Amino acid sequence: MDIFGILTMIGGLSLFLYGMTTMGDGLVMLSGGRLEKILEKLTNTRIMALLLGTVVTAVIQSSSATTVMVVGFVNSGIMSLNRAVGVIMGANIGTTVTSWILSLTGIQGSSIFVKLLKPSSFSPVLAAIGIVMLMTGKDGTKKKNIGSILLGFAVLMFGMETMSGAVAPLRDNEAFTGILTAFSNPLLGMLAGAVLTAVIQSSSASVGILQALCVTGAVSFGSAVPIIMGQNIGTCATALISSIGANKNARRASLIHLYFNLIGTVLFMTVFYMLDAVIGFSFMDTPANAAGIAVVHSLFNISCAVVLLPFADGLVKLSELTIRDEEEGEPVEAPKPAALAALDDRFLESPAFAVQLCKNAVDEMAKISAGAFKKAIGTAENYSESICDEVISLEQQADMFEDVLGTYMVRLAGKELSKEDSRTLSILLHCINDFERISDHAVNIIESIQEMHSKKLSLTETGKKEFISFGNTVSDIMELTTTVFLTDDRLLAKNVEPLEEVIDTLSIEMKQRHIQRLRKGICSLETGIILEDLITNLERISDHCSNIAVCIIEIHEGEFVTHGYIDELTVKGKDTWFSGEYARLREKYALPKPAAETAETEKMVIK
């Protein structure tokens, strides 16, 4: 084999690995996070977990990706160790699908039907369809993802054919055949398979390389079997690396993967070579082919899963003995809220699922902010120090959500996202600041109410009625906005802006009425300053509600120009629906009619 043959082999291997990566990425993008959601929710029984692990891995063409995903689930608390075991076992079975697909390169026959099954016949057609779809499809669309899958598959098969053609002359090279013969030693062959797989981070790819080498005729089943065993051990490297820095359960999950493959390999090799010593398998010295490699690969992984599934609890116990719980007295890290704990860095490689996790977390943040406001406005009528403390605690939670989510989503924005996911992420990034600010204003409200309480100040009866009415109006826009955000309902979002305009009008009217009371000597200047702060914070909350609703409307419509949208609506007479809705809401939320107040009839209460 000359230098040109080596270059051809390297080029074929590069195309093979690139095609596998492109096809896998396309499959993950096309799934839109649905596979991860299925794994997250439907793994209550071991058998179901095994089946789901098999299906998901067969679809995304990577047991390493599935196992890393499981480590992320366990690290974030989404999945327990007991549920993870079945998925890990299923991932090993699912990865055998790739070897069966690659075995198509070894099909021999002269009939038209057999020739059509050969990748060299249909791959060019898939490549042509794929490149057209890729070039004509818009970024993040299903059409473009399907194009990536088809083109990736074609490149994968072309790389496989190129590798096979490049190594074919080695069949007559004694040095090469001598090396492969040495791998018939079980330990040496297993070590070679483990190292190769650990380096390229894919058991499917290393099996494909072994299948490509079969065309030389120098790979016997005696050499192939221990290499395949080692490949299953080598694939554990990805999960082990991924678990670095994770919590104890996540590291245990990666160890379960390692123990499962180690124990399975030892059992399989012990039984296999004992039977070979007693019976003497005649096929051991015969040249292996691509289909034979697929058979051995599948038989090994299915056998291991069947034998070890009943002992899954033992694997969990073994991992817990290896990584023990903290001793008494050791510091234990304070747990994060579940929605934030779910934002594991490993899910950044599954962007669609990561976007959904971010949406779940921001939904939780929206509820926290809405809860903080509801409790804060409630203290105006029923003051309680414990409720004030709860509002402060909720505001601190909202701050934490904003910090963690902001950092995570900025990193996620750099990943390849579908059009829908990109739109969702844009909405989330814009809205987290508004929800955090709402919680800040809720704290400002309780601080103002606390000040009135500590100074034993109170509004006049009329002023109190007006404030309660105004607070109820802001409560309604807060409730409406929260519903809009949680449901991502852009039609319902259009109802927010008219109500926000009404609140702006009421805010001005509230201040004017209070000035009139000041002039009559009914209310004190000190109370007026506090009331001014309360009105301003309530009006600011309605502004943030408007920001959230407009963001949802504009991003869904393909642009985000908040002031442009609002100006277009509020120009007098330009939007008849808006004008009519504003008039309706203005009447509905009108402040109570002022009574004939005098300093004598309505004095400010000083307790």
Image (spheres, rainbow, N blue to C red):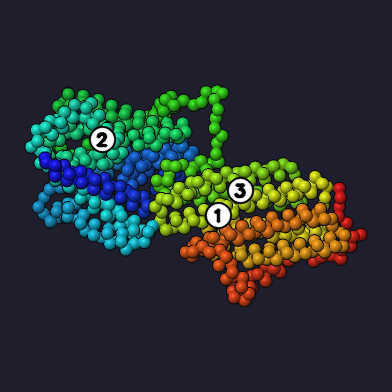
Toward the left, the furthest residue is: 172
Residue 236 versus residue 418 in the image, above or below: above
403 or 202, which lies in front? 403
As drawn, the residue found furthest toward the front would be 3
Whether label 3 touches label 2, CB < 8 Å: no
Q: CA distance from mark 2 to mark 1?
A: 47 Å
Q: Quadrant of residue 460?
A: bottom right
- Residue located 42% across and 58% down the image: 419
Determine the image quadrant of residue 141.
Answer: bottom left
Q: Position of residue 540 (x, y in %)?
A: 66, 57
Q: Which mark is residue 393?
A: none
Q: Quadrant of the N terminus?
A: top left
- Report the residue that reaches farthest toward the bottom: 573
Which label belongs to residue 196? Answer: 2
Residue 144 vertical position relative to residue 572 in the rendered view, above or below = above
Does residue 36 appear left or right of residue 216 in this picture? right
Q: Which residue is mark 1?
A: 431
Secondary structure found at label 2: helix
Q: Is residue 219 visible in this depiction of the protein? A: yes
Kindly identify the amino acid type of the residue bearing the numbered disc 1: Cys
For the residue marked with disc 3, what is the amino acid? Ile
Q: Quadrant of residue 283?
A: top left
Mark 2 or mark 1: name the one nearer the start of the chain: 2
Residue under the image location 77 percent in, 53 percent down: 530
Q: Amino acid at mark 2?
A: Leu
Q: Which residue carries the number 3 mark?
A: 368
Q: Residue at x 31, y 39 (%)?
A: 201
Regarding residue 310, the answer to whether it shows in the image is no
Image position, residue 562 (x, y; %): 56, 63
